Amino acid sequence: MKTILLPTDFSENSWNAIKYALKFYENSTCTFYLLHVNILNYAMAEDSLHIDTEDLIENTFIKPSKLQLRKTLKRISQEFPVNKNHHFFMLTDYNFFIDSVRKYVDEKKIDMIIMGTKGATGLKKIIIGSNAADVIKKVKCTTLIVPENATFTNLNEIAFPTDYFLTYGVNLLKPIYEIIEMHHASLRVVHISHDFEKLSLSQQDNKDLLQDYFSNFEMRFYNLTNKDVEDAIECFVQSRDIDMIAMVAKNLNFFQQILFHSKVEEISYHTNIPFLVIHE
């Protein structure tokens, strides 16, 4: 059984991520935890040292959140057929967002976080927001980021950009393996360089490891040469009609060249494609 954390702020954007999650795991046995965090800021934290806020928090934040979560569960029951393999629980907290997410990831033994991101109309970039960016950087849990315009379709091709410098352990690659197996998808490993360069021995070893590990599935390796790495991955995603991009959080420096700009919140590939971030 998979345990999935679904952070929500009750926006249509977060609802879209919930819909994607339910379709993504439609044929799997899952426990879904819907989490709403009433954000605690530093000013509030300091004030709480001087006054008794327990009743105030319960009545002002926790109870309204529980009511909204019940409405979300009702919406799920109305818009989705009853799935006996899916079980839902509500979580509400009054805390710093990342602290709350970390707490429940540990407490509920979460396998994956699925959360939404809002696109910027008319712009190439997606502004994923500080919460999603913080989860990617600071929470060691596999995370699926779902753009607001993403609609779940059959997961046929997953792109895995790499520079082959990172040694991949079995536990690190397991989430990708499970997704490919679950959806009968194909893996596209994409190596991008500024100029044609022969792989070093260690890079070749890491490439061979990927080939061995995913040998049970349909996969292909691509070498792209482009001085603009960002454009290279954008063209590849669109030309191949890629359904998801998978990335390794440990390889952040490489992905800053491909997906991230000066701020980790700015991601600049196709706005309708979810991206999976995996941690060790």
Image (cartoon, rainbow, N blue to C red):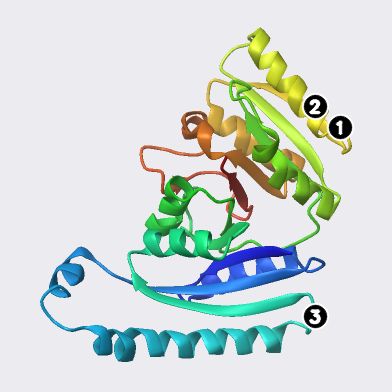
Spatial distance from mark 3 to mark 2, Cα to Cα?
Answer: 37 Å
82 horizontally vs 57: left or right: right
Between 31 and 106, the one lying in front of the other is 106
- Residue in front for this viewpoint, 36 or 197: 36
Q: Residue furthest front?
A: 107
Place of residue 41 in the rendered image (x, y in percent of width and height, measured from the top left)? 24, 66
Q: Residues within 10 Å of mark 2 (few under 14, many from 20)?
A: some
Question: Amino acid under label 3?
Answer: Lys
Q: Position of residue 187 (x, y in %)?
A: 78, 38
Note whether residue 148 is visible.
Answer: yes
Label 3 residue SS? loop
Q: Alpha-carbon distance for marks 2 and 1? A: 6 Å
What amino acid type is highlighted by mark number 1? Answer: Ser
Point 65% across, 16% down: residue: 203
Foreground mark, 3 or 2? 3
Decide if residue 238 is on the left or right side of residue 230. Answer: right
| Residue 215, numbered circle | 1
Which quarter shows the C terminus? top right
Q: Residue tagged by mark 3?
A: 84
Mark pair 3, 1: CA separation:
33 Å
